Image: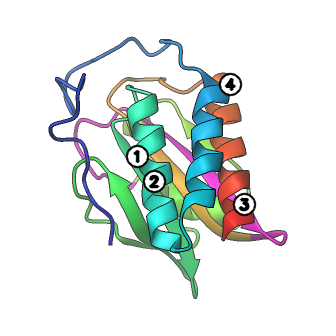
Amino acid sequence: MGTDDRDGRPGREAPRGGSPEPAGAAFDRQVLLQRVRRALRRSADRDDRLRSVVRILSRGVRKYTWTGIYLLEGGALVLHNQAGLPTPHETIPIGQGICGLAARERRTVVVPDVGKDPRYLACSHLTRSEIVVPIFKEGQVAGEIDIDSDLPDAFDEEDRRLLEEAARLVGEAL
């Protein structure tokens, strides 16, 4: 199971509930993707690689207040690594919630206001927006990257590009 790496991080005064940076704050996509590439080559252990990717993403973009990687096992998405507060949703059936929708429809799903989307599976009352990006292996959904933010409408095209490329790299490494 994953770990919660939020506490004690340098520069992370408010892991939940605070707004450490504005929604549009810049991050260097190419630098983060280079770190993901290195992390995926560094270890032979799948969970070590996934844990590293979660850390890179959650530390690299401060508005990402919960970051997790789910892998498809049977007919469900199973949480393998996370950074952020614990979630009650460690297993999500395909088609259920935003994560299940992204896996079923094989596409990135962005929810600017989770409070207005009845499909959202509440993990924290502080979460305001979510993006879920499928991970593909040999053309099939193998898992997904799930990111929550405590900021409304937090995810833009830069986030989508970063996370879709990170998901592609993870899929190649699975």
Q: Nearer the viewer, residue 91 or 164?
A: 164
- Dot 3 corresponds to which residue? 105
Q: Is residue 5 above or below residue 152?
A: below
- Dot 1 corresponds to which residue? 55
> Which quadrant holds the N terminus?
bottom left
What secondary structure is found at the residue carrying circle 4?
helix
For marks 3 and 1 on the same chain, the one whose residue lies earlier in the sequence = 1
Q: Is residue 107 left or right of residue 8?
A: right
Visual colour scheme: rainbow
* Between marks 4 and 3 in the image, the one whose residue lies nearer the viewer: 4
Q: CA distance from mark 3 to mark 1?
A: 27 Å
For marks 4 and 1 on the same chain, the one whose residue lies earlier in the sequence = 1
Q: Nearer the viewer, residue 168 or 65?
A: 168
Which span of residues is magenta-colored?
121-140
Which residue is found at the position 35% from the left and 70% from the top?
90
> In x, y percent, where is residue 140?
78, 72
- Dot 4 corresponds to which residue? 157
> Magenta stretch: residue 152 in it?
no
What secondary structure is found at the residue carrying circle 1?
helix
* Between marks 4 and 2 in the image, the one whose residue lies nearer the viewer: 2
**Numbered badge on residue 52:** 2
Q: CA distance from mark 1 to mark 2?
A: 5 Å
Q: CA distance from mark 4 to mark 3?
A: 19 Å
What secondary structure is found at the residue carrying circle 3?
helix
Which residue is found at the position 45% from the left and 30% from the top?
60
Mark 4 is on which residue type?
Glu
Mark 3 is on which residue type?
Glu
Q: Is residue 121 left or right of residue 142?
A: left
Q: Is residue 101 visible?
A: no
Q: Is residue 86 left or right of residue 140?
A: left
Q: Is residue 122 above or below residue 75?
A: above
